[in-house]
Image: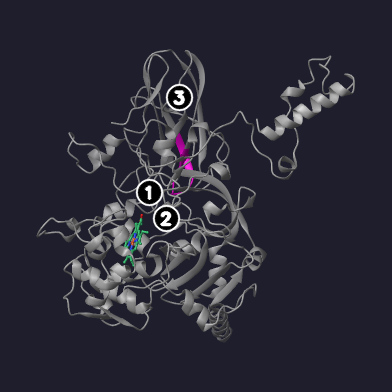
Amino acid sequence: MSSRQSDRREFLKRGAALAGGLGLAAAKPASAQLPDPEGMIVGTDDLVAYGKRSRFEDSKRIPHGGRHSPDAFGLDFHIAAPLQESVGVITPSSLHYVGTTRGSYVPDIDPAKHRLMIHGLVDRELVFTMEELRRFPSVTRLHFIECAGNRSRSSHTTVQETHGMTSCAEWTGVLLSTLLEEAGVQDGGEWIVAEGVEEVKGASTIPVNKAMDDCILCYGMNGEAVRPQQGYPLRLLVPGFEGIFNVKWLRRIKVVDQYYMTYNDYGHLTQDPATAALGYQIGPKSVITFPSGSQRLPEPGFYEISGLAWSGGGKVARVEISTDGGRSWQDADIRGEPQPMAHTRFSMNWTWDGNECELQSRCTDELGQVQPSRAQVAAFWNQPPDQPVRVKGQDNSIQPWRIDSDGNVHNAII
Amino acid sequence: MRSFRFAGLLLLAVGVCAQAQSPTYGLGRAPTAEEVAAWDIAISPDGKELPAGSGTVAEGEELYVQKTCFVCHGLNGTGATAPRLIKRDVGEVDDPWDYGRVLPIRSPYATTVWDYINRGMPLGMEGTLTPDEVYSIVAYLLFLNDVIEEDMVLDQDSLPNIEMPNRNNFARVPDWFPGQPRLEGYPY
């Protein structure tokens, strides 16, 4: 409870006492339907203007990957979303994961001064104000973003650590294709370089086919302006591609004739063509968020298993759940209508008999790509069985959770 | 027959019109040449965006200290709070990739090194280096990594032509089309 709230309560109580016990606030309600005044949240101008969650809710983000955030320089690094407490498919903006190409300051941009420039191999070079961008026909779509570093390790204990570098929001903005058509892409314009305005001016090279397909220049996120950590006032969304492509604080799109090999591109690429391909469009993936690592089932009995599934290849077509470590599988219920490149909530009714068991989930997307077990990945690439499995590119392998007979849930990745 | 031919001509004319598209919404304005130049900082592998200027290894060695690079990256680029800028001490290797993830040795193009230092360093004072200074510092770092000779002068012509050891040692990203699986033949 904030001290301001308690001061106000004291004041109310004293006022009521002075009024000779006539004040409603001090009187015990005659009927149990009225809450005790102590149990009320006293309205403040702050709460009227911009609400906040209950003080009993403490779901929060954590720095990811062992590097403190903010660091000694005040730079934000990777921050993971608390998927273990998530419900539905939308990550609240305050809890959306944050990724940066390197530690980065969050720029404090006045939208009235922000500009987007489109230039390069176009018929008409153009500069837009934010006001002008908002005048274009807009789209509103659900999309996940996921960081290439979203990789489960045996040392991770919670789903926030294993999978928290992905989130899903409702994004609003102008299709990039609308603006590229307005500018007129010239022959030979095969790629775009998208660039931010932050101190390191992060830039990524993106194929023009993707730019013309479904990329969005977003000014809106979950019903309000994009948050600063997500690129306020303008961020590029490249649905289904790895996080690094979704350039924040976007100020420039250059249409170019070749792959530019920016620092971001360079850091992302490898020698192996298979790894390069698998680190581009994200594969079919899912994870059970309840019950998940470090949670505890208090007793045998009924539970709803629930989780999130997604794919960079389109819509989630099917999710299966195994409660016996992958030996047998049952179809999970898909909640709502799956959207392309969006988190999709799945669930299954389940009665836990109190014995040790292992839960897994497996996603199949509309392209027919199936989420693999780590053993399947190792077998596909002929990796030596006595060594830890290396999943090439984006890790979309199945996440196993072991439930001990005392109800404690553990990460069962080997 | 004739009317067919006429229809064909008409289609052709419509096609030409559709190609030379005019803007639909008419929003935004054209940037000035100065505005484009000020923001056009991404350097392609062929170096066409590189500004005029030049630099030498000797100048770069001084600037590396003067511009505080050594504070974070260590004297001679051996690394400190920030990553090392000199290849790993692994002797002669068959595969230059084994020198480690160190930009001035791993990068397939010297342009990427120039571009990153120009846009992002020194951390906290980005954008303060002149083109001459960036050319010099890149020359110094490439010399430290045995990529160029000590007497080489870097400028907009010579820099893109430097044969980095990993020039042909980076995988290309696949062509991308809507509805395409991640990797042909990979079921996952």
Quarter-wise, where is residue A216 in the image? bottom right
- Magenta residues span A309-319
Magenta stretch: residue A311 in it?
A: yes
Give the number of marks: 3
Magenta stretch: residue A96 in it?
A: no
CA neighbours of label 2 inside 10 A, class few (<14), some (14 to 19), many (20+): many
Residue A152 image position (x, y, % from top left): 35, 37
User: Is any part of residue A295 visible from this angle?
Assistant: yes
> Reading the chain from its start, which is encountered first: label 3 or label 2?
2
The reply to whether discs 2 and 1 touch (Cβ–Cβ < 8 Å) is yes
As drawn, the label of residue A38 is none
CA neighbours of label 3 inside 10 A, class few (<14), some (14 to 19), many (20+): some
Q: Is residue A395 above or below residue A31?
A: below
> Reading the chain from its start, which is encountered first: label 2 or label 1?
1
As drawn, the label of residue A295 is 3
**Label 3 – label 2 distance at C-alpha:** 31 Å
> Reading the chain from its start, which is encountered first: label 3 or label 1?
1
Circles 3 and 1 on the same chain = yes
